[in-house]
Image (cartoon, grey):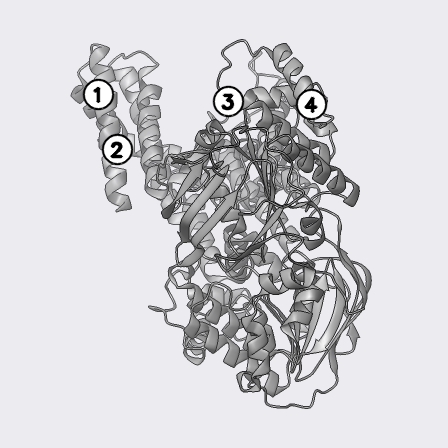
Amino acid sequence: MTGLVTALSFLLALLFGGIVLFLAGENPLQVYESMFSGALGNWNGVAETLVKTTPLLLAGLGVAVAFRMQLWNIGAEGQLYWGAIFATGLALFVIPGAPGWVMVPAMVGAGLLGGALWGLIPGVLRAWFGASEIITSLMLNYVAILSSEYLIHGPWRDPQSFGFPGTPSLPAAAWLAHWGTTRVHLGLLFGLAAALLLWIMLRRTRWGYEIGVMGENPRAALYAGMPTKRTILLVMALSGALAGLAGMSEVAGIGHQLQRNLSPGYGYAAIIVAWLGRLHPLGAVLVAFLLAALTVGGDQIQMSLGLPAAIAPMLQGTILFFLLGGDILTRYRITRVIG
Amino acid sequence: MTPSPSSPPITHHPSPVTPVPPAVAMRAISKRFGPVVANDQVDFEASWGEVHALVGENGAGKSTLMSILAGLYRPDSGQVEIDGMPVRFRSPRDAIGHGIGMVYQHFMLVEPFTVAENVVLGEQRSGVDLQTARVERELTELSQRYGLGVDPRAKIWQLSVGEQQRVEILRLLYLGARILVLDEPTAVLTPQEARSLLQTLRGMAAQGFSVVFISHKLDEVLEVADRISILRRGQIAATTTPTETNRRTLARLMVGRELAELVEHPSAEPHQTVMPGEPILELRGLSALGEKGLPALRNVDLEVRAGETLGIAGVAGNGQRELAEVVTGLRLATDGVIRIDGKTMTNRPAAEIARAGVAHIPEDRLATGLIGGMNLSENAILRVYAQPPMCSGPFLSNRAVAAFTDRLLANHDVKAPGRWAKLHTLSGGNQQKLLLARELAGQPRLIVAVHPTRGVDIGATEAIHTALREQRARGAATLLISEDLDELLALSDRIAVLFEGRVMGTLPARGAAAEEIGLLMAGISHD
């Protein structure tokens, strides 16, 4: 049932997008073919799709675990940035000479910690003061991004950068291993491992059970005497930590420095990954891959067909709109209300 | 249909020759919600110039009947006539178009807006220009004419609850209401505000309005109403006038006279005598606040012994819910002491109280005691998931969980497709049996059961009663809160009656007169 709806939503989106493309004077079939072959038609495309999958998956897992408990953490973007800041700071200034087998695990730890601490801020505000984590986590995104801007323009700026904002390059020991000549790096394995661990945690442990009960019926959790506040803190920390790992892996796997526009909104796309994946870790793997393919394919048609820059995001938006719409309409029914 | 002598002159229909049709005539109204029959062939009339009170226990169908009149619900069958003309409302707006306005228990006001702005919100005539000045002028005039004392320029959040209620009335008057329906209008008011409101209502009736109000409070009903209709279990039990009746009769009509018959036949009371043992639950001077921050429990002293069932009777909203929540650790006591098994447990966490051997069958099983979206196993282990054998280290043991669930389902005859079924797919009775099975699995010392058979079919009711009797025989102490007097009389050793958070009296269940319980429930004590 759900699979059918998803497939139909996808087809409808292609149809609608096709109409717009046709009106814009393009051949829709050619555009779609080009998108598909760009993202998945050759090894290079697949590799780029996997590169984009990595941060979407890690941040999406973080969002999913929080949403499971009905903690609406919209702050994955900021948590991602703080993971990147912690990891970069560690590699550049704390243990710059460490060998890879020390450096990489230490950076993973720093990334997790940076994201966790940033996630804990809205967690604490929610647990103790009942402040809406939607607002606080969202606002903290701007603080995080601007903190990163400050560091790369100010104290952490590379003196040899000829005025370009950015930190110096990380020591080579901090670079994540690559798969052959592609840009696919160890971060993808972090993401897959995290998905597996999270799945086991949610399904087989008492913590997963507690998170489930608190998400489905907070009053029942209170009734059963579950430690609600403590769980809010733990889940927000875990959620932030996973997004922080995404930031760390972008720095150590792709850019090899902290730079501007580290994330083109991975933390927000992560919300879609979590939601379309039905808050299931393995669902997140699938959706993160599809969303990444959509992005890479969109970039491709911009380059190969010379389409206006707006076409690719328009198609992405259309597809997401229909997928989310189909998803919502399968869960809820539209009824007329009096009044 | 005889108007009471105190009835004011009818100004709306001056014709003295033709018989005046009633303002409202509801004929053979029936309304079901799923399996629950809220209204069963109800006939109800209200005249112009009359204050008509509608009384009855919670769940008797009063609010449903009035919501049908106000266009919020459509009846399954039956006919509504306004001023002699048959009408069919599709919405509250239709109803107000026919002059019927309802003041709900929860006000429908926008707090940051002024009174006039709130009134404009409900007005269809207004276009782009809200003409607030004109509305304010008209409201001032209306407010003065009916003595409502509302300033149209005041913001809602600045007003007291009583003033907000008068804003609701003013808005309905502005929209052209001639028939006012108020759902328990005095429940939220202080005694002074209530008195002032009742005077206002009398004044409106004197000017020809038809006023219908729902109430539990027999004193105010007898004081202000011209006629009184009593609803019981979805049917009109009687319509009477204050001169023809008294509090005692009204209380009996509300509770139902078949209860008296039940008590006169001791065969209906299958108690086996168990000598009560040591006190398990002791409450001393217990007080607590309710949802709105007002006192809900006042200085309650109660004691339940091992092998004893103490029934708590009372009209809903007199502190029963708060009593159960305070004892089980879900609500803080503001004063007093709770001792369980001799140990002081006042304001201890819910988990600790549960570990001390307290089972809790909460008032609303799906909102509190169960998780509708989870499967039966996940619901079954709610109390024991953190203990061996369910849990070793952080991991839950699938095998232990399955065995535990299957045992609960089998022992209490829960009909379910399997432990993987989602809880909400079960019938109410089977849900409640699972909840009961889970709560009784730990051989509790004390059972706090709140409306344990509400909304449950007869078979499941029997099973639940049997299970509770077995627990009593085993030596458990039971605090049984119910609105069903039959159930209380059948299961309890003693019955305590709560009224406005106080224990009005405690009587032995054997030989208790339903009439006496009914009077205590209405707040009238022996003396």
Question: Camera-side residue: A8 or B257?
Answer: B257
Report the residue at 45% width, 39% height from top: A60
Q: Secondary structure at mark 4?
A: helix
Question: Camera-side residue: A177 or B269?
Answer: B269
Mark 4, Cα crowd under 10 Å, few <14 / some 14-19 / many 20+, is few
Q: CA distance from mark 4 to mark 3?
A: 67 Å
Q: State the mark number for residue B145.
A: 4
Q: CA distance from mark 1 to mark 2?
A: 12 Å
Q: Closer to the camera: disc 4 or disc 1?
A: 4
Q: State the mark number for residue A261.
A: 3
Q: Secondary structure at mark 3?
A: loop
Q: Which residue is mark 2?
A: A10
Report the residue at 29% width, 16% height from top: A303
Are the numbered discs 1 and 3 placed on the same chain, yes or no? yes
Mark 2, Cα crowd under 10 Å, few <14 / some 14-19 / many 20+, is some
Q: State the mark number for residue A18.
A: 1
N-term-proximal mark, 2 vs 3: 2
Instruction: Write down the chain letter for disc 2.
Output: A
Q: Secondary structure at mark 2?
A: helix
